[in-house]
Amino acid sequence: MFRWMFPAVLALGFAAAPAPAAEPVNKVADQVNEKMVKIFGSGGFKGLVNYSTGILVSEDGHILTVASQALDTAELIVHLYDGRKMKAVVVVTEPVLDIALLKIKVDGKKLDEPTGLNLPFFNYAESLKRPLAEAGDWVLGFSNQFEIATRNEPMSVQQGTVSSYSKLHGRRGIFDFPYTGEVYVIDAITNNPGAGGGALVDRKGQLLGIIGREIKNTQSETWINYAIPLSAKVEVVEKDKPKTVSLPEFVSLAMQGKYKPTEKQIVSITAGGFHGMRFVPNILERTPPYVDELHPNSPAVKAGIQINDLVSFIDGEPIYSIKSFNDYMRKTKPKTTVRLEVRRGDNLVTIDLPLEEWPKGLLPTLPTPKNIDPPK
Amino acid sequence: MTPRFLSRPGVWFAPVSMALALTVGLVAVEPATVQAQGPGLVKVAEAERIATIDKVKPAVAAVCFYNGKVCGSGVVISDDGYCLTNFHVVQPTGAILACGLADGKLYDSVLVGQDKVGDVALVKLLPKKPGDKFPFVKLGDSDICHAGEWSLAMGNPFGLAMDFNPTVTFGLISGVNRYQPPEGKGTLEYTDCIQIDTSINPGNSGGPLFNMKGELIGINGRGSFDKRGRVNSGVGYAISINQIKNFLGHLKAGIDTDHATLGASFSTDAEEGDLSKIFVGSVLDESDAFRRGLKPQDQLIAFAGRSTTSVNQYKNILGIFPKDWRVPLRYRRGTTSKEMLVRLMGNIDTVKEPEPGAVPPMPNPGQPRPVPQPPMPGVEKAKQSEAAKMYVAKKGYANFYFNTLLQDQILAEMKKNFGDFGKLTGDWTLEGNVQLADRGGNLKLTWIDDKTGVTEMKMARDGIEDSVKPLGEKLGQAELSLPQGSGGLLAALWQYRLLMTQLRDGMNPNANINPGFVHAGSEPFYPPPADGKMPADLNDLRVDCDVLKTKKGQFETKWYFHQKDRTLLGCEATYTKDEDPCELFFYDWKAVGDVKLPHKIVCKFADKTFATLTARTYTLVKK
């Protein structure tokens, strides 16, 4: 009730002051900034930057961040809010959450010993107790994007709203991205180079999530801004057994040194299952997959595909180009069936296509960005 | 947009309970105020925002080619039509351009001054009728801006507005004191700038950034771009208004300004744990820093009153000053820390002159480019406009016309404040007292012209006599710096009489290449207090001055006029770049007949006070 009385007093007595809805967030910016670090590591080539951002989750110097390529070094350096430069070490990474836990390494102390640093930090367990943010909520994003700040220069702060809370990964191959759980989609352009590991907070500075990578929708070529929520959770299969991997469990166990990361599923990049269709020459940026030729006795022939069919959907996912068709096919296996929907004249025809092994002598070259189509 | 708490379950009780609370114990409230809860607060904020926008909008300009095609944005800062924009916006338009205001009208405009490195330009709008006043905005204080504050950007992104009505965007200040390195040719270095997530795009360049009071805090001009192309990616940069204030005097004087360098290199220690320390690497022999005693390994503590915690911050602080400014610097050597006033050098040798003309600046990842244009038809008409009559090209100046204007102004002020010395071209004599470091006594100064008009300066004190003919031939350092240890007091005094009696005509006549009488913008000046007691903080001595630069023979002198009361506070006279100037400070102005003269003159050279001259009588002969 007292929260309500305060606005009333404001309206009565301070007509001249700016309305609270337009209040600046300076103080919040200062407070959040103290609990964040700038990370400098390896990389710096081929579009991969060697810097990122991290969130302090213990006074001892545990840091939560995105499992970016910048961490791939023996010499991680972090800059604290007051400009101190310190070494840090990766404690453990969880690839299916795309998250890593680091710890500041102080000379003379072992990694599992307390550092005695007494740093300001976000209390993860406390933050978890608050409800999820909802679409329409105001949020602030903090990160060291573009490496603008160094030493004691503060993080960059941006404002926006939560656009939605949803799964990004509804369709395979659309976002090339290991985490398949739910995210906050944000309308502020937070996900820039180096922003990964930044903090998404509410207007009071309370932690909501971790700003993620730069990712692009490969079909629409548009970029999206998202943060991994504190309560992130995914269901995976590890050694043929289902497993729930949760971010809260990761944080709590990793800080104790007890977390075991999910074993990587080895996904072989092969040509996938053999179908026998050859499409029109792939000369445009996005050539539609019109069937031009059919290999004799191939699965496509047996399933009833015809010349001039336009492959429009695979397993319910729309296909706009030969490239995206081939990207999808590469992830399939022989002896599995894919459901195609092809446009034939004015009709959309559904065809179940059982894939086979690639015949000898017809193996395509391994895919490279410019060489997607199987050769003649 | 409804605030969160209204739609959370469990809080529905609140309005009722609040009404109860109001009747019990709090001041009775009219129903209208009760309405200002919840959504009402948002509406109030919105109304305030709209009011601010409406207040400043009339002063926001669309900076265009002369024929009206939009190039970028700008903002009018005084009622006589001075308008700020980016240098990279006036580069394609050229010196005769046009600015459209929200009233839908296009105003002929002329370039006044520019800062290539800092990416700022000043233009002047011409009123439709002489005497018409322009709407303008108030300059704010960018030093009190803080990350997390709201801001408004206004301008013409993508050239959207056909009627010059600016586009408004609203967002946060994401960071302050940010540093963005120069793009390719050494220009467009954004030091100490404001970072915003307020959306700015190509076309916003040169336009205003306002705080929520509607005060101008920055000029938008660059952004960080990467994979999303050259459109807003959540990171934009505005030049801080406080930096622009440092350059405003130079810009108004039509100067093509140059940024400052110290003449020393710095490095940060790579030590872990500690806060970074900045140490001097090397110092250029010819720099003032060297003459003031800065040495390699000295630790830089503070520069221009701000502590230096990283090389970025040092660059930030340096980057907001024009060349030739003098600022305090504090350093530590061993266990002692000292403060010095150091003169900043220029930058321009490292900056390649960008090509003028209609070609837009080279595309670069760092800036929202103005809407690109091919060479414009109708630009020939520009040459016939009123604005063209206010443009004079000269090397080193964006527009020498305005320099002449300011020179005329200073000359008029001099006449008003000091009187007309025009007839007092006969011999001058000063009798009084001189106090040197180790002795003092009677003083007699004479300015005597020989038959050919060459002046001889004589100084007699306690049996010692020094004299020099400053325009004489084959003078070496020994003569030019007389009396010994003063750095050239006699030559400086000779120039004072020359200036007062002959004004502009007395100086080097080479008006086209190297004019001998120019307005040199504004600089801080540090006259020692009248009682001689130096304060703990050198910055306390600072007085902002307008500067006149004169050249005669080998001599180059800067004359410092107090910006507010227009008194002549002193001068710095040099005859060579390799030595410190002779500094004169004038006090105790009293009437002598129809004119006014300083009755106390302090002479300093190389950080030491050489002498204090006190005048009992001046005798000025008329001709």
Image (tube, coloured by chain):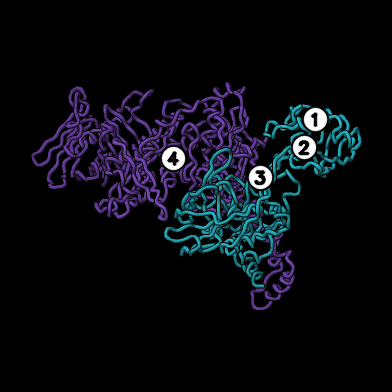
Chain colours: A cyan, B purple
The amino acid at mark 1 is Phe
Circle 2 sits on which residue?
A325
Q: Chain of mark 3?
A: A
The image quadrant that residue B475 belongs to is top left
How far apart are the two marked residues, 1 and 2, measured between alpha carbons?
10 Å
Q: Residue at x 27, y 39 (%)?
A: B594
Q: Earlier in the sequence, mark 2 or mark 3?
A: 3
Q: Please tell me the numbered disc located at residue A279.
A: 1
Callout 3 and callout 1 share a chain: yes
Whether residue B416 is visible? no
Circle 3 sits on which residue?
A215
Q: Residue furthest left?
A: B463
Query: Callout 2 environment at 10 Å: few (<14), some (14 to 19), or many (20+)?
Result: many
Image coordinates of residue B415 in percent, x first then y, are 34, 37
The image quadrant that residue B463 belongs to is top left
Image coordinates of residue B125 in percent, x first then y, are 54, 34
- The quarter of the picture where the N terminus of chain B appears is bottom right
Determine whether the residue tagged by mark 2 lies in a helix, strand or loop. Answer: helix
Circle 4 sits on which residue?
B247
Asked if the residue under mark 4 is in contact with the one under mark 2, i.e. CB atoms within 8 Å, the reply is no
Q: Which numbered disc, 2 or 3, marks the residue closer to the eye?
A: 2
The amino acid at mark 3 is Ile
The amino acid at mark 2 is Phe
